[in-house]
Image: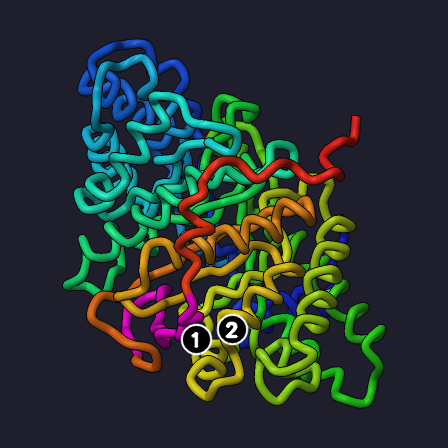
Amino acid sequence: MWISSDEIFETVRMIELEHLDVRTVTLGVSLLDCAGSTDINRVAEKVYDKIARVAGNLKQVVEEVSADFGIPIINKRLSVTPCAYVGSATDASDYTPLARALDRVAEVAGVDYLGGFSALVHKGNKRCDDVLMNSIPSALAATTRVCSSVNVASTRAGINMDAIERMGRTIHEVAWGSADRGGINCSRLVVFSNVPEDNPFMAGAMHGIGEAEACINVGVSGPGVVRAALARLGLECDLGEVAETIKRTSFKITRTGELVGREVSRRLGVKFGIVDLSLAPTPARGDSVAEILESMGLERAGTHGSTAALALLNDAVKKGGSMASSYVGGLSGAFIPVSEDAAMVEAAAVGALSIDKLEAMTAVCSVGLDMVAVPGDTPPETIAAIIADEMAIGVINSKTTGVRLIPVPNRKAGERVEFGGLLGEVIVMPVNRFSSVPFVRRRGRIPAPIQSLTN
């Protein structure tokens, strides 16, 4: 394929000046063949051995590809079969030994996070699901790299309010279990509706039952590239031209991601899965989804018009990505994690952005309420009700939604909390002061919507 010098210089500019990177290369590994023993410690040994064998040279290969192509690859990660399945044959009442084994092998493999300490309970719980959900607080306390997720709703099944009520209490417990660090363990726990099997991004990555034995999924980011393209476009053009510019830029970003993913797959000898084109921000200035919205003409992200601007962005990103690759998957679109986006943090600080406005914006973006801090004394039932609202958006709109809330112990609304690194800092956001307790305590299952009847 012939590449012009202009295209080469454009890619160099995007990397050097506009924060273009491959955010993550995630190797998914099936652990189904590690299940079967009744001894959780034996299962943990088999899990460790298999991941060490399959992922032993992941870090080296990714770094070699990054150097050969001159493209920054920020994170190397692993995802595994939901661990509720992996531990299902054991007689264990606690899967923390399995989480510890995952944490050890993640360290040996040189990855920053490993996703898949997960359960799928959108229509009901099995014994293994109960054990895993009960194990989440101790598992996250005993590890630093393991990420956990629970799928509590789907368009086909409805919303499992029993599981949501339970996750409200679990998130509260996880936060207070890491109170000395601002409840940071909650950053490794997400609650989903319509969870995708091939998501390479944390904390929700898992290797689904329908996936290959092992495969590479790539998460490409580039909000800085999109923001810069819109800055060059100026404010004189109409919104149709804005959408076209974003679409063309997303096409280029996606091609970069697929190039990296296919080469890593080839060198590892595993299948190539998907490119997840999600505009995931970082705390660095200029690498912000909120700044993209503001470049369209909004004074602050969160003001009136923000939902429409985000819908335009998300749709254009998907269109550009789908033209660039036949294997776009995962979440793909625009993320709005508050703590990881410096302009989002400032919007929250000046009152432009609230939880209610974020909830509206999640109806049109890739995921949901992500890295949102609330006061530490927020009742578990209120946390559950926030989750339920977000799950309803996902179920009714047949899309993935997620909730990654951080109740910050001993902090009140308006206070800042520094997490550091890619997690950035947060503004503790106020929650509605009126109670949802009787509603949450009804439990049961909210039935699937009529649009689930598609056969």
Per the image, is 425 magenta?
Answer: yes
Residue at 40%, 74% (x, y): give it: 429
Is 114 rendered above or below residue 295? above
The magenta stretch spans which residues?
Answer: 416-434
Residue depicted at x 59% and y 70%: 14
Mark 2 touching mark 1, by CB under 8 A? yes
Between residues 391 and 20, which one lies in front from this camera angle? 391
Count of numbered circles on the image: 2
Which residue corresponds to the image point at 44% horizontal and 70% vertical from the top-left?
432
Picture coordinates of residue 43 (x, y %)? Answer: 25, 18
Amino acid type at mark 1: Ala
Above or below, comparing residue 126 to residue 184 in the picture? above
Q: Name the mark on residue 287.
A: 2
* Mark 2 nearby-residue class (10 Å; few <14, some 14–19, many ≥20): many
19 to the left or right of 60: right
Q: Is residue 82 visible?
A: yes
Task: Identify the residue position indicated by label 1 in the image.
Answer: 284
Q: Nearer the viewer, residue 95 or 391?
A: 391
Q: Could you say where residue 239 lies in the image, as x and y percent from the top left?
A: 81, 77
Q: Which mark is residue 253?
A: none
Which residue is pictured at 56% across the width and 50% down the height? Answer: 401
